Image (cartoon, helix red, strand yellow):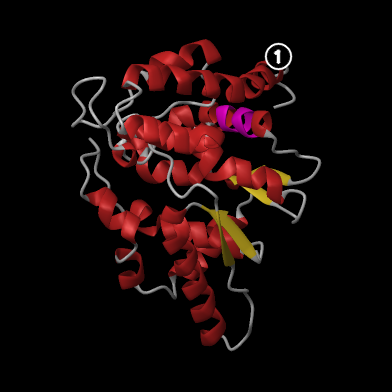
Amino acid sequence: MGNLFGALENWVKLQDEYRCFFCIVDWHALTTAYEESLNIKANVREMVLDWLSCGIDPEKSVVFKQSDVKEHAELHLLLSMITPLSWLERVPTYKERLQQPEGRNLATYGFLGYPLLQAADILLYKADAVPVGEDQAPHIEFTREVARRFNYLYDQKVFPEPATILNEYKLVPGLDNRKMSKSYNNVIEISVPPEDIPSHVRKMITDPGRIRKNDPGNPQICSIYAFHRIFNQQELSKIEAACQEGQIGCVECKNNLSGYMQSYLAPIFEKRRELEKDPQAI
């Protein structure tokens, strides 16, 4: 679901304004899950189902798999010849992930170099702009630096420096109030049936300082409130005031959120179920 609001909703809108290329980056999956390569084919299919059910339209945009276009790897190789190692080492997400317990060794060239592979994914198509979440903005700045260096070294404007198109939602929280990420095991999948939504919402972290129902709460540190920002904007100020004044309990607030989430996600789930009936089309 983090991908839905962190990327897909924006992508669907951009289809009507730009010629869009949506790449399923299966090689990128190997940078952190190299021991699970047998799962990649199934994961690609699940990703395509998610994209199509959320509104990505192959009639409007180009949807393709990274490994089907070998030039991605070729450009990555060429860019690696001119990119200083220090540029890769200073990428914020690289340093953050190395400090997290992953259960696997991420001190590999593939993991260090994945921002450069991402840059190749972008520069290969001479993209003017890239829609990303706020956490990915440093990667686009890195891509601009790589393009600038390549153009300077060879005295030709081969690659444009792509602009960043930030998504509306800077950060979609997970069940534990950290960024929603499969790495943290705190996600709600787009494929979850609507009837299962309440069981996921019940796991969400609320204000730890709120012991009793009528205690004043702090919505700003509550993941439930963060999701109300997405699913229930029309009542946001009312919910905030009720929480701060102890007029609504966390259980009631979660139940209300579940209802809004179910209403929003039900059409997506139904479309996904229809698409699953025709595996060949996928």
The residue lying at 35 percent from left, 33 percent from top is: 223
Q: Where is residue 211 in the image (x, y as percent from the top left)?
A: 18, 23
The magenta segment: 46-51
Residue 191 seen in render: no
Residue 272 picture location, percent across and down: 65, 21
Residue plotted at (43% across, 31% down): 239
When asked about the image quadrant of residue 60, the answer is top right
Q: Mark 1 points at which residue?
A: 277
The residue depicted at 29 percent of the width and 39 percent of the height is: 221
Amino acid type for the residue under numbered disc 1? Lys
Q: Where in the figure is residue 54, as x and y percent of width and height?
A: 65, 32
Say if residue 265 shows up in the picture. yes
148 shown above or below 43: below
Image-quadrant location for residue 234: top right
Q: Which residue is drawn at 22% across and 44% down?
A: 100
Q: Is the magenta stretch mostly helix, strand or loop?
A: helix
Q: Which of 171 and 209 is in front in this view?
A: 209
Label 1: element kind: loop
Q: Is residue 281 above or below residue 57?
A: above
